[in-house]
Image (cartoon, helix red, strand yellow):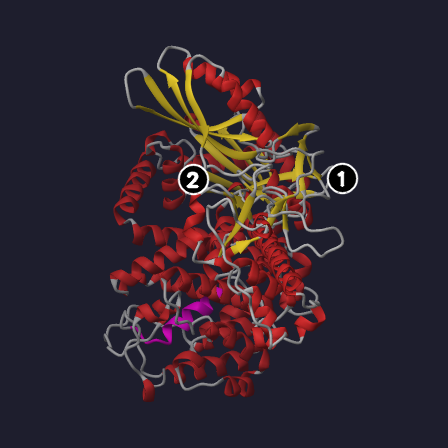
């Protein structure tokens, strides 16, 4: 903020990275480090870009410094030190002038009197757009922490869609904020560190920026669990003291061995990072002493052929640890990472992890998406260049597409977190197309990765030529053939809990919503047409379209879905179309058996329009369920009761539960059975059985039901006297005739004293 409007903006209101970077009105006059000077910044950029625009950099430096004026950070440092350090981080990534300048200016629109117009005028619209993209990420006032975090991520990814350099600046901004997190209040510190570990560190990893990811993880780890961080560091230091010369010894041995075979290589070793070690200890439930591959070595070579030759030399020198070889050169990771990985038993019986890569691969491994030089051919914007060259950017595009498919920010955050965290498994279609999925992904995830329509219509699969369940977890190298059916247009809702990837979950949820909407719309249409037929007035979609404004709905299908869900009455539709329409209320008689035929689904006379809704079972295309205390089966005289938001509940006319709806005649529907005898299906029924308490009596009762092809869903038992046991049996039968046959056979058993059907 400019001095004229400086205030004490609370950290909690800012959210995300902005929470750390906010200026504070309370000055703490102690500078922690000398700020980088103008010529230092220019020299850093010129070291990798001799054609840099020095005047542009100098003007941006002075402008940002003047704009932030006397503002200070929580540490007491001048506020300008923050954008300057962000720019310095980006020079390490060798980024272009526009990115460096945008980093210097990234807080000016939000925190000073600077405007987008002014920045456009002084530095050009390209830099202005970058600064505004970063500014929009900070203007968030959401209720819940989850919503705030989710909306931060949505805004970030939408800004990236316009220019990926927004991401690079944002990651550098977060990294510097994490480096100075100690000066932030504890409550905000916890939240910021969690968000960094949840979102920004994995996002940096997804972009291939491994060095940045590891530092973000370690800084978050130190803040969130300082005790564990300290313990791990102490153990690492003690190990380093014991093996003081081990890294140097392995480096020299490996370099000399490769040189003897005519291979020139740069060998560097290091120990693993604290957070990496801690997560491995937790994941494998082992102590520090049980970890064997604390040290890792990077072997950088001239070309791909040399990588494989060097690997052969190492494997003939030291024993390889089985199962620890991975070839990411022939099959790169989705973030463009390429290397050969192996683990060997090196000097002193110490396990050593080795990575073999070319210089270009090393650049990408260290800098990720930023390693795709923006100066390579001068053709196209940086985003366009990445679009051509980067697989990591392809993942970003896919993630951005999901924005339009998620119904709320929290759902999107859940999906994106899932995809950020998982390691990958690579599978193939029968035609050889490579599909990358998270670890533990199954065939459902694979089907949706191929195409949404394939996932929605999947009914089975073959893995490596053998039939397997859709829930089968996939392994590297599996060939997967998804079997589809045109009959299935929507997946079972239960698949959502089965799926691992965000894309699959979002698609299943979307298809389920569409299917439910279609069911409610179908039910609503039948209810409306039934009322119009009974009232002997004409119904037509075209006529309803003219009445949509009066019903406050956008389309005919929206009206029908609202009626089906019980949000709107069919009589409201009739009045909207025919203002003179008057509803005739029909008396209902609840559980009495003299309910009029038109209520219980008597077939209409031939040639007349039917006002009766046909019921074909649970899979009839309508939102149908059966009475909770006893169900209904074909052959029963039935009544339909509409429950808002739940659809139709089918009751047999003798059910005493119908008395509850005597005062709500508008909820009653005329329904009838419409069963396809060529595809039999089962329906719920309930029996009450009183049996003699003797060994084997339950087995005899279950045997009768099984012999007559009934299916037992549930049995409840209670003892009212020493001689008899009472059973309540929920079972499934085809129709009333089938149920009556089972009851008759049960009554014929000596162990059965009494049996009757239960309705409510």
Q: Residues within 10 Å of mark 2 (few under 14, many from 20)?
A: some
**Residue occupying the point 59% across, 45% down:** 333
Looking at the rendered structure, the secondary structure element under dot 2 is loop
Numbered label attached to residue 760: 2
Q: Camera-side residue: 563 or 398?
A: 563
**What span is in magenta?**
77-90
Q: Nearer the viewer, residue 50 or 478?
A: 478
Residue that sits furthest to the front in the current view: 594
Disc 1 designates what residue?
431
679 horizontally vs 85: left or right: right
Which residue is at the front of the view, 316 or 105? 105
Is there any visible trace of residue 752 in the rendered image? yes
**One can see residue 265 in this view:** no
Q: Position of residue 410 (x, y in %)?
A: 45, 58
Disc 2/disc 1 C-alpha distance (Å)? 56 Å
Q: Is residue 502 left or right of residue 755?
A: right
> Is residue 85 on the magenta stretch?
yes
Q: Is-magenta flag for residue 495?
A: no
Residue 580, x across and y down, in percent: 60, 77
Give the mark count. Answer: 2
Looking at the image, which is closer to me, 174 or 48? 174
């Amino acid at each position: 903020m400019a001095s004229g409007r400086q205030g004490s903006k609370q950290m909690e209101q800012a959210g995300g990275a902005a929470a750390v970077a906010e200026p504070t009105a309370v000055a703490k006059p102690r500078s922690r480090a000398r700020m980088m000077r103008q010529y230092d910044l220019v020299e850093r950029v010129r070291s990798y870009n001799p054609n840099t625009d020095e005047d542009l950099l100098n003007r941006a430096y002075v402008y940002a410094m003047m704009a932030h004026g006397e503002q200070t950070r929580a540490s007491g440092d001048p506020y300008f030190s923050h954008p300057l350090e962000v720019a310095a981080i980006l020079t390490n990534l060798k980024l272009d002038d526009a990115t460096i300048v945008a980093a210097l200016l990234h807080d000016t629109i939000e925190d000073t009197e600077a405007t987008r117009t002014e920045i456009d005028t002084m530095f050009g619209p390209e830099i202005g757009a970058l600064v505004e993209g970063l500014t929009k990420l900070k203007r968030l006032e959401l209720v819940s922490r989850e919503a705030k975090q989710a909306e931060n991520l949505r805004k970030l990814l939408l800004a990236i869609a316009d220019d990926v350099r927004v991401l690079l600046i944002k990651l550098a901004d977060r990294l510097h904020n994490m480096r100075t997190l100690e000066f932030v209040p504890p409550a905000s510190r916890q939240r910021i560190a969690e968000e960094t570990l949840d979102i920004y560190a994995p996002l940096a990893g997804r972009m291939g920026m491994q060095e940045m990811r590891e530092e973000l993880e370690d800084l978050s780890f130190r803040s969130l669990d300082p005790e564990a961080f300290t313990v791990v560091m102490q153990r690492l230091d003690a190990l380093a003291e014991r093996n003081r010369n081990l890294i140097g010894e392995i480096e020299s041995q490996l370099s000399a061995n490769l040189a003897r075979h005519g291979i020139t290589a740069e060998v560097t070793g290091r120990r693993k990072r604290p957070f990496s070690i801690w997560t491995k200890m937790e994941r494998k439930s082992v102590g520090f002493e049980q970890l064997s591959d604390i040290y890792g070595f990077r072997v950088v070579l001239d070309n791909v052929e040399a990588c494989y030759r060097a690997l052969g030399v190492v494997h003939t020198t030291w024993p390889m640890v089985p199962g620890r070889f991975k070839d990411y050169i022939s099959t790169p990771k989705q973030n463009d990472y390429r290397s050969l990985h192996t683990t060997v038993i090196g000097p002193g019986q110490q396990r050593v992890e080795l990575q073999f890569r070319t210089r270009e691969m090393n650049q990408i491994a260290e800098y990720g998406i930023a390693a795709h030089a923006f100066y390579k051919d001068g053709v196209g914007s940086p985003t366009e260049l990445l679009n051509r060259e980067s697989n990591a950017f392809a993942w970003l595009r896919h993630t951005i597409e999901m924005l339009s498919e998620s119904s709320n920010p929290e759902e999107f955050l859940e999906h994106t977190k899932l995809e950020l965290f998982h390691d990958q498994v690579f599978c193939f279609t029968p035609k050889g197309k490579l599909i990358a999925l998270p670890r533990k992904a199954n065939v459902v995830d694979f089907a949706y990765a191929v195409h949404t329509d394939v996932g929605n219509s999947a009914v089975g699969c073959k893995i490596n030529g053998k039939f397997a369940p859709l829930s089968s977890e996939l392994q590297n190298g599996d060939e997967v053939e998804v079997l589809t059916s045109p009959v299935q247009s929507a997946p079972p809702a239960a698949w959502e809990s089965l799926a691992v990837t965000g894309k699959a979950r979002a698609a299943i949820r979307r298809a389920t919503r569409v299917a439910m909407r279609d069911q409610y719309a179908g039910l609503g249409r039948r209810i409306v047409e039934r009322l119009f037929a009974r009232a002997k007035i004409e119904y037509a979609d075209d006529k309803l379209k003219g009445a949509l404004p009066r019903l406050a709905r956008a389309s005919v299908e929206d009206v029908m879905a609202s009626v089906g869900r019980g949000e709107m009455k069919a009589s409201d539709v009739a009045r909207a179309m025919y203002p003179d329409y008057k509803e005739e209320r029909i008396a209902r008689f609840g559980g009495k058996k003299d309910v009029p035929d038109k209520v219980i689904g008597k077939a209409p006379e031939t040639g007349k329009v039917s006002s009766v809704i046909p019921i074909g079972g649970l899979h009839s295309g309508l939102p149908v369920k059966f009475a909770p205390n006893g169900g209904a089966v074909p052959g029963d005289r039935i009544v339909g009761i509409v429950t808002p938001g739940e659809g139709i509940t089918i009751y047999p006319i003798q059910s005493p539960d119908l008395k509850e709806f005597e005062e709500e005649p508008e909820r009653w529907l005329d329904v009838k059975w419409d069963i396809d005898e060529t595809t039999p299906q089962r329906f719920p029924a309930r029996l009450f059985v009183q049996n003699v308490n003797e060994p084997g009596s339950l087995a005899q009762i279950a045997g009768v039901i099984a012999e007559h092809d009934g299916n037992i869903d549930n049995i409840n038992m209670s003892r009212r006297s020493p001689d008899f046991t009472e059973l309540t049996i929920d079972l499934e039968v085809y129709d009333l005739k089938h149920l009556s046959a089972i009851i008759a056979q049960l009554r014929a058993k000596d162990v059965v004293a009494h049996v009757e059907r239960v309705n409510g």
